[in-house]
Amino acid sequence: MADEALFLLLHSEMVAGMYRAAEQGEGENGRCTTKLESMGFRVGQGLIERFTKDTARFKDELDIMKFICKDFWTTVFKKQIDNLRTNHQGIYVLQDNKFRLLTQMSAGKQYLEHAPKYLAFTCGLIRGGLSNLGIKSIVTAEVSSMPACKFQVMIQKM
């Protein structure tokens, strides 16, 4: 429980610190999102490396996505993804109805515009994990009502 609270506080301070620095003229908001996504990418690479060292090779892309939704998500966020959808053409939608990094914020509409900056790190986390498993992807996040969110993963064919 303590490690979860520390992770939530660290994430919150990373986002706040990044945007505070941008407000003081040390950067721009678009670059803050990119920096947070890059941090998440590196962390995702490292975590996947640790989590998969004792697992068998994955058969296909869908197996990898199932691993991300079940094992990876459970380890990082203490719960599985609520819903995984695919069109079987390289697009996956991961839905979390009670996303941990957004539950601390009010469920009101007034905070909806701030939600994307709290999702950039997680987009990088997913992209970094997939990258280390040999899948190049683009990950975007969408919030229509708090604290639910959807991550869309578009696989880039090489």
Image: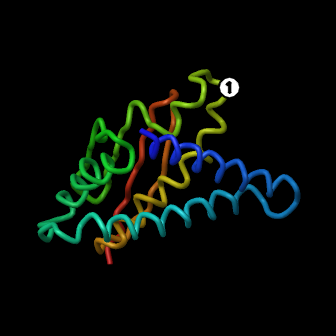
Residue at 44% from the left image edge and 59% from the top image edge: 125
Determine the residue located farthest toward the right in the rendered image. 24
Residue at 48% from the left image edge and 66% from the top image edge: 41
What is the crowding at mark 1: few (fewer than 14 residues within 10 Å), some, or many (at least 20)?
few
The total number of labels drawn is: 1
Q: The C terminus lies in which quarter of the figure?
A: bottom left
Residue 88 position, x and y percent, is 21, 54
Colour scheme in use: rainbow
Helix, strand or loop at mark 1: helix
Residue designated by label 1 = 110
Q: Is residue 96 above or below residue 91?
A: above
Residue at 62% from the left image edge and 32% from the top image edge: 112
Q: Is residue 89 above or below residue 38?
A: above
Determine the residue located farthest toward the front in the rendered image. 2
Residue at 88% from the left image edge and 60% from the top image edge: 25
On screen, residue 98 versus residue 9, left or right, reads left
On screen, residue 52 versus residue 55, left or right, reads right
Residue 20 position, x and y percent, is 79, 51
Comparing 23 with 78, the one in front is 78
What amino acid type should be assigned to the residue bearing mark 1?
Answer: Gln
Q: The N terminus lies in which quarter of the figure?
A: top left
Determine the residue located farthest toward the bottom in the rendered image. 158
Residue 70 position, x and y percent, is 24, 47
Question: Which of the 4 quarters of the picture holds residue 34?
Answer: bottom right
Residue 51 position, x and y percent, is 27, 63
Q: Is residue 136 above or below residue 123?
A: below
